[in-house]
Image (cartoon, rainbow, N blue to C red):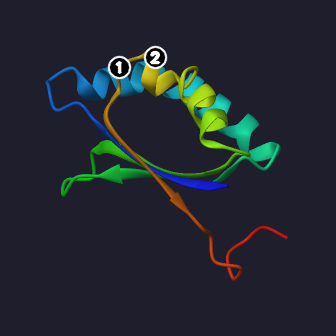
């Protein structure tokens, strides 16, 4: 089952420093997830000045429980970077699916 996550960072003055502190661990875990085919797509969301303010990720897990287990170890969750997370089931178009 595929899931879309739109996760917005906090809006306080420490939001960007928290993101940058957790970013290396987040990118390492994302690379692992992509290598096994669980992470299908990922982008950083930007404000009008180009500052990172959130993420949009597409994952594939057997169930919502698998996604929740991943979120429990996601560095941006553990580091209190993502403060507003919306999860929706989705389906990646066959035109964009990995071969």
Q: Vertical placement of 48 versus 78: above or below? A: below
Quickly name the residue at label 1.
80
Q: In this rendering, would 23 be left or right of 29?
A: left
Q: Position of residue 25 (x, y in %)?
A: 58, 23
Kindly check if marks 1 and 2 are in contact, taking CB atoms under 8 A apart as contact.
yes
Asked whether residue 89 is in view, the answer is yes
Q: State the quadrant of the C terminus.
A: bottom right
Residue at point 60%, 68% (across, down)? 91
Numbered disc 2: secondary structure = helix
Image coords of residue 64 (percent x, y): 60, 41
Where is residue 4? Give x, y as percent. 50, 54
The answer to which image quadrant residue 81 occupies is: top left
Q: CA distance from mark 1 to mark 2?
A: 6 Å
Q: Which residue is mark 2?
A: 78
- Residue sitting at x 54%, y 21%: 72
Viewer-side residue, 3 vs 42: 3
Query: Residue 52 location, x and y as percent?
Result: 32, 43
Residue extending furthest toward the left: 12
């Amino acid at each position: 089952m595929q899931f879309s996550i739109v996760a917005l960072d906090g809006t306080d003055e420490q939001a960007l420093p928290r993101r940058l502190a957790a970013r290396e661990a987040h990118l390492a875990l994302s690379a692992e997830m992509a290598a096994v085919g669980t992470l299908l797509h990922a982008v950083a969301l930007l404000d009008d000045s180009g500052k990172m303010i959130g993420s949009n990720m597409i994952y594939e897990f057997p169930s919502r429980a698998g996604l929740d287990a991943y979120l429990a170890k996601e560095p941006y969750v553990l580091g209190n970077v993502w403060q507003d997370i919306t999860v929706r089931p989705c389906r990646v178009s066959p035109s964009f699916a990995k071969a």
